[in-house]
Image (cartoon, rainbow, N blue to C red):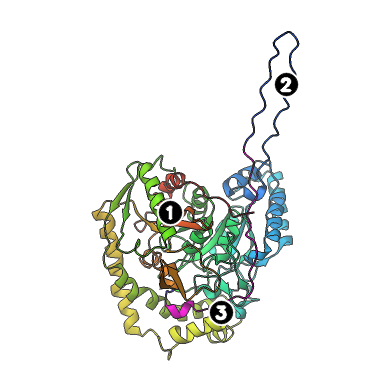
């Protein structure tokens, strides 16, 4: 997703929801009452035992725990799938899904139950229903890309990432709503309706993978597939208070995914815990699960205040400062060190590459997978906001069309310079990762998509939402987002940790104590 202001002017959604939603919480563990001793021979009766703690609702389970229970036969796959489907029905107002087929989900769950009864060895994702962003090909469901022309498009095969999860025993829960063609950060989709933030239905969940993030945060599923070009995993994770992981570009296959640019595109997971991100990574890469780091003692985290910490919303600044103190208290070493030149390099490379590449990558995707339309027909039937962006920035003759000379300079000069700057920064300061607030603001209101107020200053929407996440994905780095706290108004704020390219497993290993040190935030309000 590029960060030009014209690409963020969307039609204000008229409908708003009145209440937030969330998962029921387990009651705290209760202790049985002590026996009251009698002073003489006649013993006093035992005090009535306090009620036992209510079991956590099935929809609250993390992926790892649910899989373990189903694998042991303690929980039927069909029963678990039904619990998630019930939750989906309860939270229909979120508009998290474009396609949801309960009968198919339950049928596949029954197949898994039959396999276990027949003695088959459960896979690492046994019985887990996983929501899939509707830009990732699925054989049994349409892949719309969130755009009208592909409303009935059914690819002939699953994308490799979906095939890997299914081979490990997972089921497709459904296809999640997104920003149309992944070209935006709001998930205010004019064709399929706006996705709503579980913490406040009047606010965006972020984009473009807003449907997956909303589903995970609202306990419709514990683990989902998202996709990120310039923030589409990380912005929704930050706004919805969940964990998100964008791996090093190329770590996971992006075949069978509606593209923007092969230089930046990368699929990745949304989850409510680091353990489930690690599980996803081990399945997709077929690498053995890694051992988590024992602590943050000696972990070096770069803090570049010259770019990532400037002009933050006061609540984001407060929560970020408190979170950094918690990391230091846990043993992390915060290394204050600037990373100059980032803004200029991103401005010269990120949008130019995306707006150039999408024209060719989308046309190739439509032809390769047998879509019923070509690129021209796709754009002609797209929503007005997306049409305007493509005609101005993507198609020849547009006012902001990217020439070959500009594109070549972005690809061959400015991106390599940015990558070198990061390599030098990590090496010079001996950093394991760098840390910063993922976004400058908490989730904006639906329709508040041109400018935002930050400390009394009008700030372009794209700068407020995407400034901090753009450099890492442009440089191809692995990025981890973890919730850091809630604003006074109850909205999530997150930290992002970007690490050297190729150090995904090291980042995921240290993510466990990072998560433990930051703590968990409250679920969306019930």
Q: Closer to the observer: label 3 or label 2?
A: 2
Q: Which mark is residue 40?
A: none
Check the picture and name the quadrant holding the C terminus.
Answer: bottom right
Instruction: Classify 10 Å Cα crowding around label 2: few (below 14), some (14-19), many (20 and above).
Output: few
Q: Is residue 499 visible?
A: yes
In the picture provided, is 441 more to the left or to the right than 161? left
- Residue 484 vertical position relative to residue 443 in the rendered view, above or below: above
Q: Camera-side residue: 356 or 213?
A: 213
**Label 3 near label 1: C-beta < 8 Å?**
no
Residue bearing the label numbered 3: 11
Segment tinted magenta in the rendering: 4-28
As helix, strand or loop, the secondary structure at mark 2 comes to loop
Q: Position of residue 202 (x, y in %)?
A: 59, 67
**Mark 1 or mark 3, which has the lower sequence index?**
3
- Residue 303 falls in which quadrant of the image? bottom left
Distance, label 3 to label 2, CA atoms, is 66 Å
Residue bearing the label numbered 1: 319
Instruction: Classify 10 Å Cα crowding around label 3: few (below 14), some (14-19), many (20 and above).
Output: some
Q: Camera-side residue: 113 or 506?
A: 506
Q: Which mark is residue 46?
A: 2
Q: Position of residue 290 (x, y in %)?
A: 45, 45
As helix, strand or loop, the secondary structure at mark 3 comes to loop
Q: Camera-side residue: 47 or 186?
A: 47
Q: Position of residue 233 (x, y in %)?
A: 49, 63
Q: Looking at the image, which residue is at 57% across and 56% down?
A: 217
């Amino acid at each position: 997703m590029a960060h030009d202001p014209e690409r963020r002017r969307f039609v204000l959604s008229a409908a708003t929801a009145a209440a937030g939603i969330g998962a029921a919480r387990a009651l705290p563990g209760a202790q049985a009452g002590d026996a009251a001793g009698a002073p003489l021979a006649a013993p006093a009766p035992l005090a009535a035992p306090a009620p036992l703690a209510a079991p956590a609702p099935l929809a609250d389970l993390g992926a790892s725990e649910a899989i373990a229970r189903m694998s042991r036969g303690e929980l039927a796959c069909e029963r678990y799938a039904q619990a998630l489907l019930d939750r989906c029905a309860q939270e229909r107002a979120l508009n998290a899904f474009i396609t949801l087929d309960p009968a198919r989900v339950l049928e596949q769950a029954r197949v898994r139950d039959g396999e276990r009864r027949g003695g088959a060895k459960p896979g690492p994702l046994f019985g887990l229903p996983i929501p899939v962003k509707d830009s990732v090909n699925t054989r049994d469901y349409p892949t719309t890309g969130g755009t009208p022309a592909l409303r009935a498009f059914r690819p002939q095969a699953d994308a490799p990432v979906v095939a890997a999860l299914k081979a490990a025993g997972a089921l497709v829960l459904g296809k999640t709503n997104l920003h149309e063609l992944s070209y935006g950060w709001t998930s205010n989709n004019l064709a399929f309706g706006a996705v709503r933030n579980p913490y406040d239905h009047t606010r965006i969940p972020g984009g473009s993978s807003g449907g997956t993030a909303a589903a995970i945060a609202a306990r419709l599923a514990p683990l989902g597939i998202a996709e990120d070009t310039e923030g589409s995993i990380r912005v929704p994770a930050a706004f919805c208070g969940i964990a998100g992981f964008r791996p090093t570009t190329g770590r996971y296959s992006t075949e069978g995914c509606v593209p923007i640019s092969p230089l930046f595109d990368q699929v990745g997971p949304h989850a409510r815990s680091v353990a489930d991100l690690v599980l996803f990574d081990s399945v997709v890469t077929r690498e053995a699960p890694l051992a988590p780091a024992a602590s943050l003692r000696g972990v070096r985290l770069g803090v570049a205040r010259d770019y990532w910490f400037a002009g933050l919303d006061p609540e984001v600044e407060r929560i970020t400062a408190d979170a950094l103190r918690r990391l230091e208290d846990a043993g992390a070493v915060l290394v204050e060190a600037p990373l100059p030149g980032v803004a200029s390099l991103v401005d010269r490379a990120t949008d130019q590459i995306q707006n150039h590449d999408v024209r060719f990558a989308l046309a190739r995707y439509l032809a390769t997978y047998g879509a019923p339309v070509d690129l021209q027909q796709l754009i002609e039937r797209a929503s007005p906001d997306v049409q305007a962006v493509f005609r101005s920035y993507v198609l020849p003759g547009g006012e902001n069309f990217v020439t070959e000379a500009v594109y070549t300079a972005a690809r061959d000069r400015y991106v390599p310079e940015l990558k070198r700057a990061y390599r030098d920064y990590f090496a010079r300061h001996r950093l394991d990762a760098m840390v910063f607030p993922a976004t400058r603001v908490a989730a904006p209101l639906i329709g508040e998509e041109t400018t935002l107020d930050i400390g009394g200053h009008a700030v372009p929407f794209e700068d407020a939402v995407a400034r901090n996440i753009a450099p890492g994905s442009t440089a191809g780095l692995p990025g981890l987002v973890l919730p850091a706290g809630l604003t006074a108004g109850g909205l999530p704020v997150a930290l992002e940790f970007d690490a050297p390219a190729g150090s995904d497993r090291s980042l995921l290993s240290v993510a466990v104590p990072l998560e433990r040190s930051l703590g968990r935030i409250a679920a969306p309000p019930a």
